[in-house]
Amino acid sequence: MRDFEKPGRSAVFAANGLCATSHPLAAKVALDVLQAGGTAADAAIAGAVLLGICEPQMTGLGGDCFILLKPAGEERVIGLNGSGRAPAALSAEALRARGLTAMPIHGIDTVTLPGAVDAFCRLNADWGRLPLADLLAPAIRYADEGVPVAPRVARDWGEDESILQGDARRFYLLDGAVPRVGQIFRAPGQAEVLRRIAREGRAGFYEGEAAEDMIASLRALGGGHTLDDLAATQSFYTDPVSTAYKGIELIEHPPNGQGATALLMLNILKHFDLTALDPLGAPRAHLEAEAAKLAYDARNRFLADPDRTTRLAHMLAPETAARLAALIDPRRALPAATPLTEAVHRDTVYITVVDRDRMAVSLIYSIFWGFGAGLASQKYGINFQNRGAGFSLTPGHPNEAGGGKRPMHTIIPGMIAAGGRVTLPFGVMGGAYQPCGHARFVTNLVDYGMDLQSAIDAPRCFAAPEGMKVESGYAPETRAALAAMGHSVIAPEEPIGGAQAIHIHDSGVLEGASDPRKDGCALGY
């Protein structure tokens, strides 16, 4: 239990339904949908789409999503992959011929087709109870009338403003300037696109005027994207991957997401007695950092489009984790893992919802870097994602860029099961940090017995390629001890990640927690 004399927030407890996400308006809309009779899937869609208006630097209709869903009355978990593909015209060979040795981070070459809208339509059709038009109505209203810019959103907006190019500056700046806290941001073009989706379903986005606007804009920017590329975009169901850790099961979305990286991290950490270590001490932070370096190195080698990921079983095999754990020196840091272009990326949104029938949804939705590729469509202002930056240009690599391929993604929804029952949908935002964030959240709960909100609030650190990022919540002596171990200790440029979680207690009571590093909250009824 937290110290009520210190600043902090309590977890939220509710009996019927609960949502936790990174913006209060989205949490309220999701709760309204639950109270109107919608399922957790309905509520997650309504909240997620609104997040694209409330946090446009993080996500939007031009992005991708991944979903884990536990059906009502069942304990199985289903994955839905809402990631789009590269246009058929993308060629690694052509990019290398231009002198590139790695994918650019922004610009037209990085734009992959948006998959989230198709996934939302499929999720509603298969697992919803309310009409899609009802779920999109709040986002349409807010896009037309505007939303006040929240504090964390304003901060991120300012940091990402330089990425915006051409039409994107017209749609995502107010009179040419970054919006201030409390200023109203409107997106009437997106409202019109949402109306089309409400009327026509996926055809309102992947065909017709909205599709023509996106493809004409991309081609005017030099892209090889086609209407056929967009129309062919489809989400698909998949089976999650998981690992056991000290009495619980961590469930992750399979590739092309990086959830397997979190599983490998936990498999490595099993070989050490974390319970004997101070949760805020240098030895625990060091072991986590070393496990992350090794797991991320495996990620960089193996994870790719599901059609091209062939070493997943090897990556998750117990003997692989044992061999990697043996490489860790408890007293000395290993070199950093090979960096990818997404190493410093942090931008995404996450929402989790549990309804009165105990359907649970864990949904993550992103345009990758802040404002994605920095480009937007000319008529409606759809912000294009830069997921293609996650491809490799190494010849023969499983994740080598190519037409029709899905790149390796950073975004990963999570769930925890215990005793044969799904107990905890959760997610940790923060780009490359996410697998490390999943592992830390699990070990905070399991090894250190933290309550849900404390497990989210606790200080974080991350062995990024540019150095060991250590939040200010760590003591100076811990920083000094990490430096003595060989870590290049640096202050993060912003809080590390952001998390949301809901615990479904044995009693049936719901407990929700929301990260104070973001603007959001947990709400229940």
Image: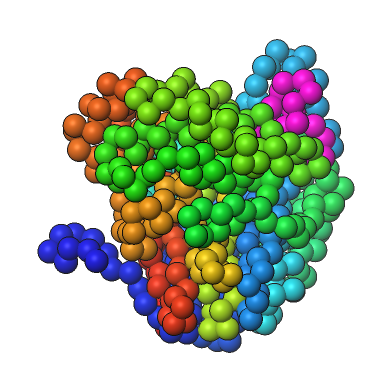
Q: Main secondary structure of the magenta part?
A: loop
Quadrant of the frame with the C terminus: bottom left
Identify the residue shown where x is 63% and y is 60%. 67
The magenta segment: 390-406
Q: Picture coordinates of residue 31 (x, y %)?
A: 48, 77
Residue 27 in percent (x, y) is at 45, 70
Q: Is residue 423 left or right of residue 66?
A: left
> Which residue is rendered at x = 16% and y = 66% of the image?
4
User: Farthest right residue?
Assistant: 228
Based on the picture, tell me whether residue 399 belongs to the magenta stretch.
Answer: yes
Seen in the picture, residue 359 relative to 146 is either above or below; the reply is below
Quarter location, residue 380: bottom right
Q: Is residue 77 left or right of residue 59?
A: right
Question: Where's the N terminus, which quadrant?
Answer: bottom left
Q: Is residue 346 visible?
A: no
Question: Closest to the observer: 454 or 284?
Answer: 284
Q: In this rendering, does residue 361 appear at all?
A: yes
Please tell me in which quadrant of the rendered image residue 238 appears. bottom right
Is 232 covered by the magenta stretch?
A: no
249 vs 197, left or right, is left
**Coloration mode:** rainbow
- In the image, residue 70 lies at what x, y percent? 63, 70
Q: Residue at x 37, y 63 (%)?
A: 452
Position of 206 with respect to 335 (left or right) is right
Considering only vertical position in the picture, is 295 above or below 238?
above
x and y percentages locating residue 501 in the rendered image: 45, 63
Determine the residue positioned at 81% across, 59% down.
208
Q: Is residue 303 above or below residue 93?
A: below
Towards the viewer: 137 or 432:
432
